Image (cartoon, grey):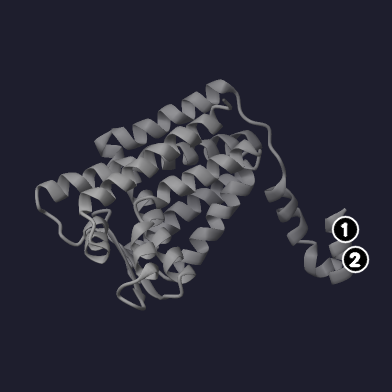
Amino acid sequence: MVAAELIGVVGPHLLSPVVPLWERASAVQPPPSGQVIAATAAVAFLLVAVPGLWARTRHAVTIVHEGAHATAAVLTGRRLTGIRLHSDTSGLTVSVGRPTGAGMVTTVLVGYIGPALLGLGSAALLRAGHAVGLLWLLLVALLVLIVQVRNWFGLWSMLVFGALIVAVTWWASAEVQVAFAYLVTWFLLIAAPRPVIELQRLRRRRRTSGSDADVLARLTHLPGLVWVGFFLVVDVGALGLGGWWLLGL
């Protein structure tokens, strides 16, 4: 009904290619079977737990981490100047603004909780039946971020993940798209705590002094360990709640 009214107002030639895409992205899909949900959770766990796989899949976590920094910077009025993603799975988001204050704290704060919050939001969409819509939203987010990337490896990383999402949303069956959306969501939720644990290991060995936790310590005068604990509580909490939703409990 809404699509037909829009075509009548704006014109069929302008909206006719858009309406099918919108209807496809906004459609409600039934949840997969319990076996599929369990299988996607198991695969996501392996992608995080197996060192050889984690060395590659961690790049996806870095993209979300830096994307969270970038989003917070823009929303708090800072000027985003670029994102860099490196082959060692590290990243850097640069923004211009006040070096202290709520905007700076928020920008630094969201990195390590970004994957968990995205996973939780994704779980909420899946709970509402919008698996295909979730994939399209992730693709749009990648397209928005990619224009801010300032190095070739970062561009390549985003193109690879973007191409994977395009392939699934464009050519895969509805069942495969739903299963893939569950896999992505489980991965975000399960993967989120691991970088926090790795961060604390590096801090304990004094191999880093410029991490998000250390920057927050300088900005807020609270120990870096407090911020590491905060990251972990949020990430584990999101995993618990998001997992509850995905399992349909």
For disc 2, the neighbor class at 10 Å (few under 14, some 14 to 19, many from 20) is few
Q: Position of residue 122 (x, y in %)?
A: 54, 44
Displayed quadrant of residue 83? bottom left
Q: Is residue 123 above or below residue 208?
A: above
* Residue at 43% from the left image edge and 54% from the top image edge: 160
* Residue at 88% from the left image edge and 58% from the top image edge: 4
Q: Is residue 62 left or right of residue 72?
A: left
In the rendered image, is residue 103 in sight? yes
Residue at which label 2 appears: 8
Q: Position of residue 232 (x, y in %)?
A: 32, 42
Q: Callout 2: helix, strand or loop?
A: helix
Near-viewer residue (35 or 68): 68
Near-viewer residue (73 or 29): 73
**What is the residue that sits farthest to the left in this orientation?**
205
Q: Is residue 133 above or below residue 143?
A: above
Q: Please, what is the three-letter code of the amino acid marked with disc 2? A: Gly
Circles 1 and 2, Cβ within 8 Å, touching? The answer is: yes
Q: Please, what is the three-letter code of the amino acid marked with disc 1? A: Ala
